[in-house]
């Protein structure tokens, strides 16, 4: 019915060159005539961050806004879970009451 096709390996079409052989060369050691003085290490040049009063106010305001939004979302999710739990409990009581009253009428 369905026969899978096995891909075949394509043959190279371009000019094929054999791999080149690298031969090791002799190492020549150089001895320094006089010791070279080492330079003193310098501190890495990093840009400094300067906070202006306006930037601090903006940073605090942005952080407060994020906290308020995240808090509102979490409180609304907690409220949704609480309302759902309460409604399920009320439904369970109503169904229990209906089943109990049906058994008494027979």
Image (cartoon, grey):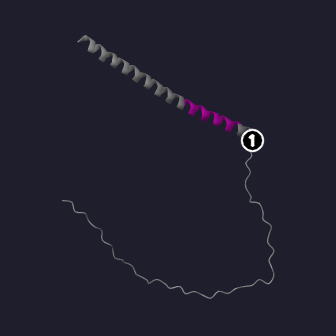
User: Residue lying furthest bottom in this view?
Assistant: 26
Residue picked out by circle 1: 52
Single out the residue that lies furthest toward the top: 105
69 sits left or right of 42 in the view: left
Q: Residue at the spot x=73%, y=55% of the render?
A: 46
**Foreground pick, 84 / 51:** 84
* Dot 1 alpha-carbon crowd within 10 angstroms: few under 14, some 14 to 19, many 20 or more: few
Q: Position of residue 64 (x, y in %)?
A: 64, 33
Residue at 57% x, 31% y is 71
Q: Nearer the viewer, residue 74 or 12?
A: 74
Q: Is residue 39 above or below residue 74?
A: below
Q: Which segment did they paint magenta?
A: 57-72
In reply to whether residue 6 is colored magenta, the answer given is no
Residue 28: image quadrant is bottom right
Residue 26 x %, y %: 62, 88
Q: Secondary structure at mark 1?
A: loop
- Which quadrant is home to the N terminus? bottom left
Residue under the image location 78 percent in, 65 percent down: 41
Q: Given the current orientation, which residue lies at the most extreme left position? A: 1
Q: Is residue 51 left or right of residue 12?
A: right
Magenta span: predominant SS is helix
- Place residue 14 in its image quadrant: bottom left
Residue 97, image quadrant: top left
- Inspect the magenta stretch and tell me whether residue 62 lies in it: yes
Name the residue located 25 percent from the left edge and 63 percent from the top edge. Answer: 4
In the rendered picture of this protein, how many numbered marks are placed on residues?
A: 1
Q: Is the C terminus in the top left, top right, bottom left or bottom right quadrant?
A: top left
Relative to residue 89, is residue 105 depicted above or below? above
Residue 38 pos. (x, y %): 79, 72
């Amino acid at each position: 019915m369905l026969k899978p096709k096995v891909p075949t390996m394509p043959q190279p079409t371009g000019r094929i060159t054999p791999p080149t052989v690298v031969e090791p060369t002799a190492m020549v050691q150089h001895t320094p005539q006089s010791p070279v003085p080492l330079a003193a290490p310098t501190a890495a040049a990093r840009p400094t961050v300067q906070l202006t009063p306006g930037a601090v106010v903006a940073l605090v305001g942005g952080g407060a806004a994020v906290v308020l939004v995240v808090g509102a979302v979490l409180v609304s999710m907690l409220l949704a879970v609480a309302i759902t739990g309460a409604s399920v409990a009320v439904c369970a009581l109503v169904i229990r009451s209906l089943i109990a009253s049906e058994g008494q009428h027979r």
